[in-house]
Amino acid sequence: MTPGSSGPRWLPARLQRRLQALVGIAVLATLILHGWYTIDEQSAQARRGLENQALSLARTLSAATEAPIITGNLTGIEELILHSINFSDVRSIRVLDAQGHPLGGVAREPGHEARLLLDPKPLDIETLGRVPRVGIDRSATHERVVAVHPIEAGNLLGWVRVEFDTDQWRKNAMTIGITSVVAGLLALTGMA
């Protein structure tokens, strides 16, 4: 190499530019693929964590609402769920009797106060089942993690249904994606 040259003398300039472009594209593709893989892995891990958290809260509320259901203490149920809605990603909690009729419910949107749900219509108990479960509920406006846990004290007394928001994990995935693209662009500019 001679002073001021950008590459080896034995490599023609035209081939050198093509090689630089090819390496740049390979680096960019690698960084984007790594970003995509990281988004996928981190999203799956966040989803599993949120599902475990939702099921754990539903299980805890199930155990805590047994006595108030047996004694008919609806005020006790409302107090329990009003305190539980304060977890950061919890969006709604419902306690239902064995026929699916609401015994208490509370909801909270980000940046707003919790509000009691006064929804008199029962939920379809056929879809609730008698086994604790957790899954993703997708609607046109949002995606939520939903956990359902039966309340049992010898017999089925009802269910606890908890909904968690997925906005934070979406924001994290977007941040990883943007960071990967920026890293790829910086790598390309560094090669130029």
Image (cartoon, grey):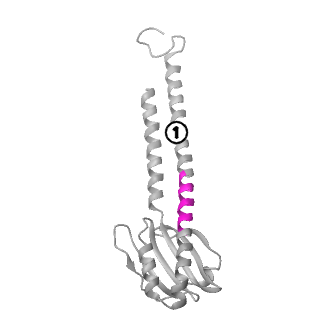
Residue at image location 58% in from the left, 89% down from the top: 99
Q: Which residue is mark 1?
A: 31
Question: Measured along the vertical axis of the image, is residue 101 above or below residue 85?
Answer: below
Q: Where's residue 25, x and y in %?
A: 52, 33
183, above or below 16, in the image = below
Q: Position of residue 4 (x, y in %)?
A: 40, 12
Q: Could you say where residue 96 lies in the image, as x and y percent from the top left?
A: 53, 84
Q: What residue do we see at 48% from left, 63% from top?
A: 166
Which residue is pictured at 56% across the width and 72% down the height? Answer: 147
Residue 171 in magenta stretch: no
Observer able to see residue 37: yes
Tell me the quarter of the picture where residue 168 sits. Answer: bottom left
Side of 123 relative to 187 (left or right): right
Observer-nearest of 132 and 171 = 132
State which quarter of the image contains the C terminus.
top left
Label 1's element? helix
- Numbered range of the magenta stretch: 42-54
Q: Amino acid at mark 1?
A: Leu
The overriding secondary structure of the stretch rendered in magenta is helix
Query: Toward the viewer: 10 or 99?
Result: 99
Q: Is residue 136 visible?
A: no
Q: Farthest residue to the left: give it.
A: 112
Q: Residues within 10 Å of mark 1 (few under 14, many from 20)?
A: many
190 and 158: which one is in front?
158
Q: Residue at x 52, y 76 (%)?
A: 61
